[in-house]
Image (cartoon, helix red, strand yellow):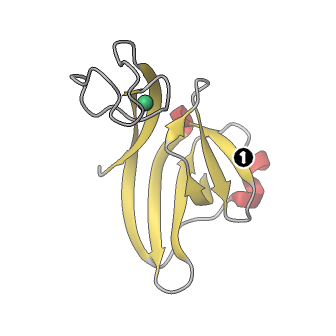
Amino acid sequence: MWLKCEWIGKTVSEKGRVPVKFADGTKYSLRVDQIEKIVEVFYPGAAGYVYYVLYKTSHPEFYEKWSEEPDGGYQSEYDVEVYKVPICPVCGWEIEDLEYEECPRCGAPLYKPKYITRLILSKP
Ligand SMILES: [Zn+2]
């Protein structure tokens, strides 16, 4: 089913969930492995960007009130991928290059980076 979202977070929790804000303002988290596709729709004018998430669920009744199919506007379609990325264990800075010995932001040693999971939208 399609879910209309105003915002989608980029960091996936340890339980495999990603935070979203539905179009009515409700905050929730969706299971990343149940997201099949995301369509970004641009509405020129006040509304800006809105995301429609194609979500596989065995409880459609729970999501009914946020369900809406993408329409109108300019659409871009994405597949969803998740990647583990290293971050500074002290300040959370995303380490782009594992050759760094210390964090350019806070100076902490980076020999033992922490990893977080990022949600990446990619063109199919
Ligand atoms: Zn740092």
Location of residue 12 with respect to 22 vertically, above or below? above
Q: Which of 75 and 23 is in front in this view?
A: 23
Amino acid under disc 1: Pro
Q: Name the residue under label 1.
A: 60
- The residue furthest left is 99
Q: Position of residue 21 (x, y in %)?
A: 66, 55
Ligand 1's quadrant is top left
Asked if the beta carbon under badge 1 is closer than 8 A to the nearest atom of ligand 1, the reply is no
Residue pictured at 74% horizontal, 65% vertical:
24
Residue pictured at 58% horizontal, 30% vertical:
13
Q: Where is residue 5 in the image (x, y as percent from the top left)?
A: 61, 59
Q: Where is residue 82 in the image (x, y as percent from the top left)?
A: 41, 33
Choose top left, top right, bottom left or bottom right for residue 68. Answer: bottom right
Q: Where is residue 104 in the image (x, y as percent from the top left)?
A: 32, 34
Crowding around mark 1 (Cα neighbors within 10 Å: few <14, some 14 to 19, many 20+) is few
Choose top left, top right, bottom left or bottom right for residue 94. Answer: top left
Location of residue 19 with respect to 107 vertically, above or below? below
- The residue furthest bottom is 45
Q: Which of 87 and 26 is in front in this view?
A: 87
* Left or right: 9, with 28 as reference point: left
Residue pictured at 21% horizontal, 22% vertical:
99
* Left or right: 70, with 93 as reference point: right
> In the structure shown, which secondary structural element does the residue marked by tag 1 occupy?
helix
- The residue furthest front is 107
Location of residue 32 with respect to 47 vertically, above or below? above
Residue pictured at 27% horizontal, 20% vertical:
101
